Amino acid sequence: MNPLLKAGGLTLVVLLAACYEKSQALGGPARKADTAAWGPSEGAKPGFAAAGWKGGDKAAWEAQIRTRNQVQNDYLR
C-alpha cells in the first residue's frame, strides 16, 4: 500500500474519532421533588443551619433570610 494512502486513512480515522460524543442522557433514577426551603431539617448539619432555627417555621425562615440579606447589603455599610 502507498504510505500516503495509509497516512490519509489514519488522518481520516483520527478526525472522525474526534467528532464522537458520548450520550448525555440521564440513565439513573428520576429526580426527587423539591421540598420547601423552610421545611423540616431532620438531616441538616449544625454548621449549615442558623443558630436557633427550627425546621418547619416559615416565618422564622423568612426573617433569617431578611436578616442575612441586610448583613450582606453593601449600601448599608
Image (cartoon, rainbow, N blue to C red):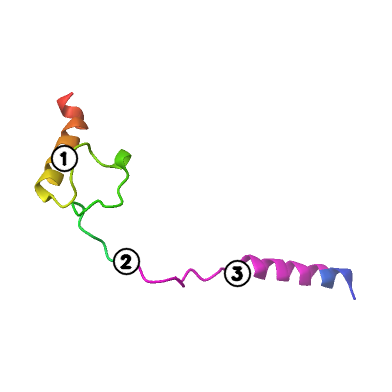
Q: Which residue is mark 3?
A: 20
Q: Which residue is mark 1?
A: 64
For label 3, count other residues whose C-alpha is less than 10 Å away and answer few (under 14), some (14-19) or many (20+). few
For residue 63, side relative to residue 15 (left or right): left
Q: Residue at x 48, y 68 (%)?
A: 24
Are the residues flagged by discs 3 and 2 in contact, CB closer than 8 Å? no
For label 2, count other residues whose C-alpha is less than 10 Å away and answer few (under 14), some (14-19) or many (20+). few
For residue 18, side relative to residue 31 (left or right): right
Instruction: Name the amino acid type tagged 2.
Output: Lys
Magenta highlight on residue 18? yes
Which badge, 3 or 1, comes first in the chain's sequence?
3
Q: Residue at x 26, y 42 (%)?
A: 49
Q: Which residue is mark 2?
A: 32
For residue 10, side relative to residue 70 (left or right): right
> Where does the N terminus fall, quadrant-wise?
bottom right
Badge 2 marks a residue whose secondary structure is loop
Q: Quadrant of residue 32?
A: bottom left
For residue 59, side relative to residue 44 (left or right): left
Instruction: Name the amino acid type tagged 1.
Output: Gln
> Disc count in the image?
3
The single residue placed furthest to the top in the displayed view is 77
Q: Quadrant of residue 46?
A: top left
Magenta highlight on residue 11? yes
Residue 58: percent from left, percent from top: 12, 50
Q: Which residues are magenta?
A: 7-31
Residue 3: percent from left, percent from top: 88, 69
Badge 3 marks a residue whose secondary structure is loop
In this picture, is 1 found above or below 49?
below
